[in-house]
Image (cartoon, rainbow, N blue to C red):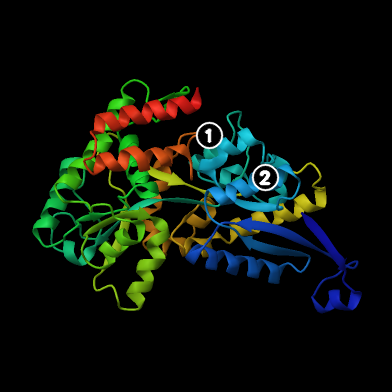
Amino acid sequence: MIRKIGKLTAATALALGLSGPAWAQVEVEWWDFLGGGDGVRMKALIGQFNEEHPDIQINGTTLEWGLPFYTKVRTSVAVGQGPDIMTYHLSRLPLALEEGVLSPISEADLETAGISTGDFFPASIAAASSEDGALMAVPFDIHAIVTYYNRTALEGTEWLDADGNLTGLNSIDDMTALLTWAKDNGFSDPLSFQTEGGGGTWRVFYTLLRQQNGEMLTDGEVLAGDNLDKAANAIKIMADWRAAGLIPEQAAYEASVALFSGGKSVLHINGVWEVPTFKDQTEADTLGFDWFANEVPQLMDQPATWADSHAFAIPNDPDMDAETRDAVLTVIGWMEKHSLDWAGAGHIPAYKPTVDSDAYGALQPNATYASLAGNAAFDPRSKIAGVASPIYDAVDNLIAPAVHGFLSADDAAAEMKAQLQALLN
């Protein structure tokens, strides 16, 4: 929805530094799901945009993350009561295509926004496009898991190079050796991540699967061929670490973060969005050690890291007029060109000119792990995948229990294949 707010008087227009005929102000209704540090940064960007654009004003609304957000989008767009622009996880794009809730974004639209597909990392554009190549959203970032590590603890070991980056982690055995060393040296939970299920376990599992060149979905079949064995192997790796006391038992998300910040874990695998947490603790002098973050090491056949993208999407509203759409596209283009501020939340901007800038190069540890943009492994393109999807349920009900020894890795993989395949048939 967009509403024109009366015309400014000539005197007001001149006071604002505007010239020409009286200006009409338009309001853009904006929905997002951004809380915490993400929300603070986005609200600041919206405020800056509004200050710089007296003719376009964004009215931002933040809704509950996950399934509630996407349910509201689906129902609101269906009755013509959706926003003018919204944030969207690209992992949810396949389901959005099935529901018909998004409006395609044309080359002409991109020109209006002052951007082009060549300005973005190819993996994010692929994730934002339909199977026939139509662009359905504009990527804003690539957010992935990274490996946070205790530099102080690793100082002088074989796993830290002269620049303070992780090194010597080229296989599962290498990683196990580091974690075993940490266990022997007083770290109770050497590698922490969210092990109770949900997002954290999925992200590590999917990274290990993709590093084997494994695929969750192939031509509509779940874990086809030797992908089933690769999935079982990924689960077994985590289960073996848990059995050896190298990862925590049933750690909730917040607990997994606290294990690292509290000095009980030497490594922590989590999303880039926790960078501000550890920076804030460093500034407050409450962390007690030097930390950094690198791309998740390549431990198997190929580099791969679970990733998703926040993107900007336009709801499928046949009544949206050209003026409304142009205003929305102006917002999108401006946000992309100011994505350095968004990078402060730890995210890698999807807009390559920002990543290529000197200012981004000086942003650490972000610039060091930006290499993962070339190895981003997005969720499978399917209605059963993505944020708050049936795959997440399978993680809760099957993968996490197998990691904790309640069923075998082979049985968990086989049952996951059966359950998810039934949803596709």
Q: Secondary structure at mark 2?
A: helix
Report how far apart the C-alphas of labels 2 and 1 lie in the structure. Answer: 17 Å
- Is 220 on the left-hand or right-hand side of 416? right
For disc 2, the marked residue is 75
Amino acid type, label 2: Thr
Disc nearest the viewer among 2 and 1: 2
Instruction: Give the x, y percent position of residue 285.
Output: 30, 78
Determine crowd level at label 2: few under 14, some 14-19, many 20+ residues with C-alpha closer than 10 A.
few
Determine crowd level at label 1: few under 14, some 14-19, many 20+ residues with C-alpha closer than 10 A.
many
Q: In this view of the protein, can residue 356 be seen by the observer?
A: no
| Dot label at residue 383 | 1
Q: Nearer the viewer, residue 1 or 266?
A: 1
Amino acid type, label 1: Lys
> Residue sitting at 33 percent across and 31 percent down?
213
Residue 362 occupies which quadrant of the picture? bottom left
- Is 171 on the left-hand or right-hand side of 75? left
- Is 169 on the left-hand or right-hand side of 359? left
> Residue sitting at 56 percent across and 51 percent down?
68
Q: Nearer the viewer, residue 414 or 233?
A: 414
Asked if residue 7 is positioned above or below residue 77 in the image, the reply reads below
- Is 233 on the left-hand or right-hand side of 2? left
